Image (spheres, rainbow, N blue to C red):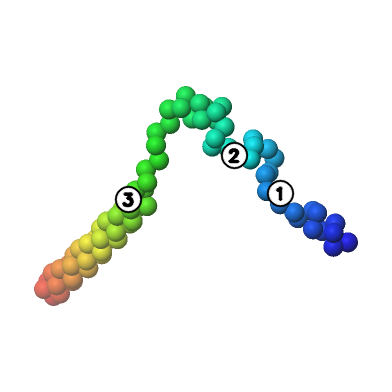
């Protein structure tokens, strides 16, 4: 029974013909020519840094907005109290 369970959950090293040979997918000439023909834009390796910078700017904008809202509420409260 244990052998049946192991056979069901066994993950083969090469799944569904993903690799054409022992040298791997990236050394396949057809795959390399496909990549060249696609002329894909190279990945932005600094994308993580860009995301972090964007989050920092968003956090700063949120803090400025909250600070501005607090100042506006305080100013309006002072004006309302001055009326009475």
Camera-nearest label, 3 or 1: 1
Camera-nearest label, 2 or 1: 2
Residue at (63% x, 40% y) in the render: 22
Circle 1 SS class: loop
Q: CA distance from mark 2 to mark 1?
A: 17 Å
Say which label, 2 or 1, has the lower sequence index.
1
Q: Residue furthest left?
A: 82
> How would you rate the neighbour count of disc 3 (Cα within 10 Å): few for under 14, some for 14-19, many for 20 or more?
few
Camera-nearest label, 3 or 2: 2
Q: Which quadrant holds residue 31?
A: top right
Q: CA distance from mark 3 to mark 2?
A: 35 Å
User: Mark 3 = which residue?
Assistant: 50
User: Mark 2 = which residue?
Assistant: 23
Say which label, 3 or 2, has the lower sequence index.
2
Q: Is residue 7 visible?
A: yes
User: Mark 1 = which residue?
Assistant: 12
Going by the image, does 31 lie left or right of 52? Answer: right
Horizontal and vertical percent position of residue 70: 22, 68
Horizontal and vertical percent position of residue 3: 85, 59
């Amino acid at each position: 029974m244990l052998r049946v369970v192991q056979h069901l959950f066994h993950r083969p090293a090469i799944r569904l013909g993903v690799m054409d040979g022992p040298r791997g997918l990236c050394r396949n000439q057809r795959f390399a020519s496909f990549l060249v023909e696609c002329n894909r834009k190279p990945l932005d390796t600094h994308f993580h840094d860009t995301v972090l910078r964007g989050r920092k700017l968003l956090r700063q904008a949120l803090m400025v907005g909250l600070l501005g809202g607090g100042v506006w509420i305080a100013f309006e409260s002072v004006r309302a109290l001055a009326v009475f």
